[in-house]
Amino acid sequence: MNTINRIILTGLVLIVVGAGAVPAWSANEVYLKNGRTMTAGSVEWREGSQDYLVVSGDTSVPIPRAQVDHVVVDRPAEFDRAATMVKSRVYGQAIPLLEGIVKKYRMLNWDVEAAKLLAQAYLEAGDAKKGMAAMDVVYATGGGEVPTNLQMLYWKTLAMAKEDDKLRLALDRAIGTGGPDLVCAAYMARGNLFLKLGEEDDALPDFLKVMTLYPNVKAPQPEALFRAAELMDKARDPRGAELRNKLIQEYPGNEFAVKAAAVPKLSSPVAKPATPAAKK
């Protein structure tokens, strides 16, 4: 079982926070890019004119999208109900509620938060096409913080669907913006993608980055050691044996340590080459 599958199987718990509404839903505040904050009774996003209609009492003010930083609106009552259904894996009931929120709360942030849950529901239910489409909505709108486990589930789905280009873009995005756990998971996934594509020279640096840049992120270390050792063995690099010994000694009983212990020793190693640069 590789690193992505292992982490996914520990459970997908989403932490979702946001804001949104379309036809005049109750709102709290509209934050403008000039620093002003408008308190509103309701907000409506108008697709045709690409503006927000901000209503306060008897006053209605259209605000062009370009002037709005973000809008904070009341949490839809059905959102928590849908989130509970997703957590309970009742996807058939959750999906219609979430689709409704995505539609009603267009451009008011709750559409993005609902899309995250919708993506999880579709992907967990095995509907790869709709799950990937929901994730496209999340990323196209900025998406804010996307839970690590959801991103990893998305990567796994892209890999299974052979969407290699989209997978590479998603992994590059995670490496550029994520925290240590997400970055390590992305390096491992990208390294394995390179292996699948036969691009071994690009795969090795990604596994080495996990080992050298993030030694305190323990979960991916056994697989990173094993994959790097395999690639070094192919290059007749004696450091492959060193990495296997490290794996066996530091992670006894791990599935990759067991595999490493079964690898026959190399004979006639060549000179030790330079280590690939560990850069993002």
Image: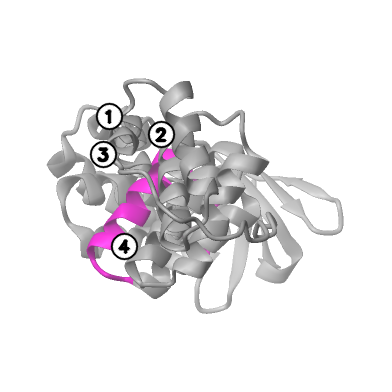
Q: Is residue 95 above or below residue 237?
A: above
Residue holding disc 4: 158
Residue holding disc 2: 14
The answer, for residue 19, to whether it is visible in the render is: no
User: Considering the numbered disc 3 on the image, is that residue within a helix, a strand or a loop?
Assistant: loop
Across and down, in percent, residue 146 comes to 50, 45
Mark closer to the chain start, 4 or 2: 2
Mark closer to the chain start, 3 or 2: 3
- Tell me the quadrant of the picture where the N terminus can be found: top left
**Amino acid on which disc 1 is placed:** Lys
Left or right placement of residue 143 versus residue 62 in this view: left
Left or right placement of residue 129 versus residue 73 in this view: left
* Circle number at residue 87: 1
Which mark is in front, 4 or 1? 4
Magenta region: which residues? 138-163
How is the model colour-coded? one colour
Q: Are marks 2 and 1 in contact (CB under 8 Å)?
A: yes
**Amino acid on which disc 2 is placed:** Leu
Mark closer to the chain start, 4 or 1: 1
> Quarter of the image holding residue 271?
bottom right
Q: Are marks 4 and 1 in contact (CB under 8 Å)?
A: no
Residue holding disc 3: 1
Mark 2 vs mark 1, CA separation in Å: 8 Å
Mark closer to the chain start, 2 or 1: 2
